[in-house]
């Protein structure tokens, strides 16, 4: 019996980590390949020369890029570039497999424009790994991505340069202006809303891809971080045990690119702008943890003594 309990707990830990993209760096090609159940297999540019550009220049730069012998690059979606942030780290808050970054406070473009103002687009700032927005004519850094399963036939397409500035140990190069007629690379879809559905009889929401069950009852617990953790660990809800506090990426997975909570969820806090605890603590300070606000922002670090809402999760 003890052996069975140990194995069950071990499997639960493995499943809990599955939502975190698994990445591996190819030093010879200066790329990082990350795998995620919803985002798929993505290859990330990770060379020493880092482009800085306006939004349109950044799009052209990626679409015309031939790097490491591959074409088919593009600007990442907001969900994709947030997936390589590591909230347990700080300055820079990026997954350890990435070798090059344009300074700890550098902001990087996503390919998603801001829903409320099409003159702005989402960026990710790797000082803390959070998102923000920027005017399209501002200069931000560029990290291109491509589908790792792209066909071999398109991998050796010649590329044209564009007007993005390339940074390499403070040296700036300005490539000649050119415009490619090639069609933009196909975009990898953000986490799919269709992967989630609500079981009204049990007041839970099921994520059929990540194999997660989310609490979605009318009574929403509010407490500090320690109380939130204990609440989930002791929860018996909808006839199930084994609940826990979700990590940052799990909470982000139930929102769309505009950070609006998935339509399958029926209940939220007092209003849609309330913050929810994640289990992700800051590696430099155990007194702060990440909270997610379902209002166009991926959240912020908060003192664990504060009172926030709780939405527990479990594997199923």
Image: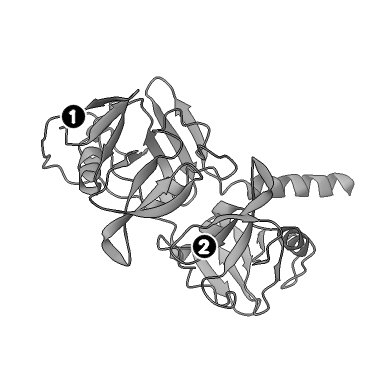
User: Quick check: can you spot residue 177?
Assistant: yes
Position of the C terminus, as image quadrant, is: bottom right
- Displayed quadrant of residue 107: top left
| Side of 312 relative to 84 (left or right) | right
> In terms of secondary structure, where does tag 2 sit?
loop
- Percent x, y of residue 99: 45, 28
Q: Residue at x 49, y 46 (%)?
A: 129
Residue extending farthest top: 28
> Residue 111, image x and y in percent?
31, 51
Instruction: Using the rendered view, name the quadrant where residue 133 is placed.
Output: bottom left
- Identify the residue under disc 2: 254
Q: Are marks 2 and 1 in contact (CB under 8 Å)?
A: no
Near mark 1 (Cα within 10 A), the count class, few <14, some 14-19 or many ≥20, is: few
Between residues 166 and 268, which one lies in front from this camera angle? 166
Closer mark to the observer between disc 2 and disc 1: 1
> In the displayed structure, does residue 163 sit left or right of residue 188?
left
Give the label on residue 174, or none: 1
Q: Position of residue 212 (x, y in %)?
A: 61, 59
Q: Residue at x 12, y 39 (%)?
A: 180
Q: Is residue 243 above or below residue 165?
A: below
Across and down, in percent, residue 272 comes to 51, 74
User: SS for tag 1?
Assistant: loop
């Amino acid at each position: 019996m003890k052996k069975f309990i140990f194995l069950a707990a071990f499997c639960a830990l493995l499943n809990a980590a599955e939502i975190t993209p698994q990445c591996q760096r190819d030093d010879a090609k200066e790329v990082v390949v990350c795998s995620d159940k919803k985002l798929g297999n993505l290859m990330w540019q990770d060379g020493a020369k880092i482009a800085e550009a306006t939004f349109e220049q950044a799009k052209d730069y990626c679409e015309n890029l031939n790097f490491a012998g591959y074409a088919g690059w593009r600007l990442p979606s907001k969900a994709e570039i947030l997936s390589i942030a590591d909230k347990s780290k700080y300055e820079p808050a990026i997954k350890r497999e990435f070798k090059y970054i344009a300074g700890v406070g550098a902001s990087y473009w996503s390919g998603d424009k801001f829903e409320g103002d099409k003159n702005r687009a989402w960026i990710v700032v790797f000082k803390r790994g959070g998102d923000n927005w920027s005017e399209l004519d501002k200069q931000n850094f560029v990290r291109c991505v491509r589908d790792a399963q792209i066909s071999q036939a398109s991998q050796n397409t010649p590329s044209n340069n564009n007007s993005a500035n390339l940074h390499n140990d403070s040296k700036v190069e300005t490539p000649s202006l050119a415009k490619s007629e090639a069609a933009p690379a196909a975009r990898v879809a953000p986490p799919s809303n269709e992967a989630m559905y609500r079981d009204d009889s049990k007041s839970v929401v099921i994520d059929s891809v990540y194999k997660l069950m989310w609490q979605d009852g009318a009574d929403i617990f509010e407490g500090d971080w320690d109380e939130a953790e204990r609440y989930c660990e002791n929860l018996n809800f909808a006839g199930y045990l084994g609940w826990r506090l979700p990590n940052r990426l799990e909470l982000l997975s139930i929102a769309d690119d505009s950070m609006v909570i998935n339509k399958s969820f029926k209940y939220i806090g007092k209003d849609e702008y309330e913050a929810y605890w994640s289990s992700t603590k800051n590696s430099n300070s155990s007194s702060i943890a990440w909270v997610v606000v379902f209002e166009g922002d991926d959240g912020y670090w908060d003192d664990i003594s504060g009172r926030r809402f709780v939405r527990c999760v479990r594997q199923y």
